[in-house]
Amino acid sequence: MNHHRKQIRAALFGATGYSGFELMQLIDKHPGIEITHATSRQAAGLTLNEVYPTLSRRRLCAPDAVPLDQIELAFLCLPHGGGPGCSMEEAARLRAAGVAVVDLSGDYRLRDLGEYLRWYGSEHRYPELAAAAVYGLSEWRREAVAEAKMVANPGCYPTCTALSLWPLCGENLLRSAPLVINAMSGVSGAGRSAKVANLFAEVNESAKAYNPGQKHRHLPEIRQTLHAMAGGSLPGEVVFTPHLIPVNRGILTTTYAGLKQGVTLQQCRTLYREWYADAAFVHVLDEGEQVCLRHAVGTNQVVISLHQADEHGVMVCAAMDNLIKGAAGQALQNANLMFGFEETEGLL
Ligand SMILES: NC(=O)c1ccc[n+]([C@@H]2O[C@H](COP(=O)([O-])OP(=O)(O)OC[C@H]3O[C@@H](n4cnc5c(N)ncnc54)[C@H](OP(=O)(O)O)[C@@H]3O)[C@@H](O)[C@H]2O)c1
């Protein structure tokens, strides 16, 4: 169905969080989607600009006050899990009412619900909806997203990692060696709720690996996507270590990728350019250029630079804004695809 240029009425659940705020700002400038309801449990009754002075005077409402028969689309900027107000339940309630959903949480991303239980710590209560959800890595699943009513927006690290490695996986150029992904993230990646570990005095002038030793929840998601991109099975293990760095926003990943015998850096760069020729939001830098956070922060771009690591492999560096391409921007990109708008509408 093509709703091109029709005004889509949408609700934003979790409008007072970091990704909700970002999405609110983006959609305010989108010509085709209107946020008719923005929710918060704690700030219901206040206006958005009482929480964020730069936003409009729209009044926030409680999640159960959204008239589901009056909206076509809902963005869930909510925590994962089956607790009250969390994404798993809200998505099911909205889908039962016929509302299309873009869920920014991790609840509907993993195909294997045994893995969901293991990494998210609770039983998935809606296996049918989880099976129907399309994994919304927009560039990778464009056609499927366009047909979807339930989109699981990818995690921030998985978005940056997967787009930075898709050509190598898709063309089967990786040799049998571990894919070693070191990633850094700004503090907004952890959301807006108060945690001692994320206080300014804890984070500033410092840096640390967190959830090291293959313990971050994004690992199974990264594995799932890279395996699928490689046609079912990657030749090597994925070793993923995230780091917290003292910036507000942005993700930088550096990945060591071992290549099959004879594959050169120049071939890889040419391949990346071909692969992403029609991708408005993936930018591959020239030889000699080195990506940094500033290239991507504030945009919906994943910016990639490729470097020779040793005679057997390359270093793929990628930068992205965790709140835009890693969350709100990609959610809007997916909504554009779902409702027949230009994929780039509101995002350039
Ligand atoms: N931050 C990122 O970089 C990023 C990137 C990709 C994906 N995500 C995912 O996007 C979702 C939102 O992330 P965020 O960083 O925007 O979160 P956040 O800043 O902590 O905001 C959470 C929002 O959800 C609402 N909420 C509703 N039920 C809640 C509950 N039971 N517990 C806590 N909050 C509840 C909060 O408002 P009330 O408490 O007033 O209802 C608030 O508006 C998460 O699932 C996160 O994993 C985040």
Image: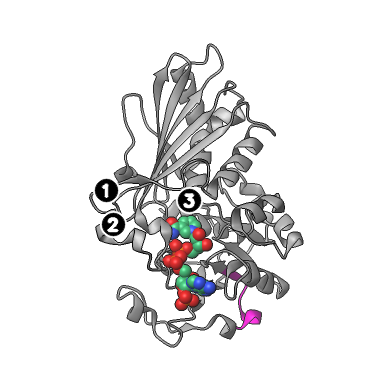
Closer to the N terminus: mark 3 or mark 2?
A: 3
Kindly check if marks 2 and 1 are in contact, taking CB atoms under 8 A apart as contact: yes
Which label is found at residue 149? none
Report which quarter residue 189 is drawn in. Answer: bottom left
Indicate the colouring scheme: one colour
Does the numbered disc 3 mark a residue whose Cβ is under 8 Å from ligand 1? yes
Find the magenta span and give its range.
67-74
In the rendered image, which residue does mark 1 sit on? 206
- Comparing 335 with 85, the one in front is 85
- Comparing 83 with 311, the one in front is 83
Residue at the image position 62 percent from the left and 72 percent from the top: 90
Residue at the image position 31 percent from the left and 39 percent from the top: 292
- Comparing 7 with 265, the one in front is 265
In the rendered image, which residue does mark 2 sit on? 202
Closer to the N terminus: mark 3 or mark 1?
A: 3
The 10 Å Cα crowd at callout 3, few under 14, some 14 to 19, many 20 or more, is many
- Comparing 32 with 180, the one in front is 180
Residue mark closest to the camera, 3 vs 2: 2
> Which amino acid type is shown beneath numbered disc 2?
Glu
The vertical placement of 158 against 133, above or below, is above
Please tell me whether mark 3 sits on a helix, a strand or a loop.
helix
State the residue lying farthest toward the top: 262
The vertical placement of 160 against 315, above or below, is below
Residue at the image position 57 percent from the left and 63 percent from the top: 80
Which label is found at residue 156? 3
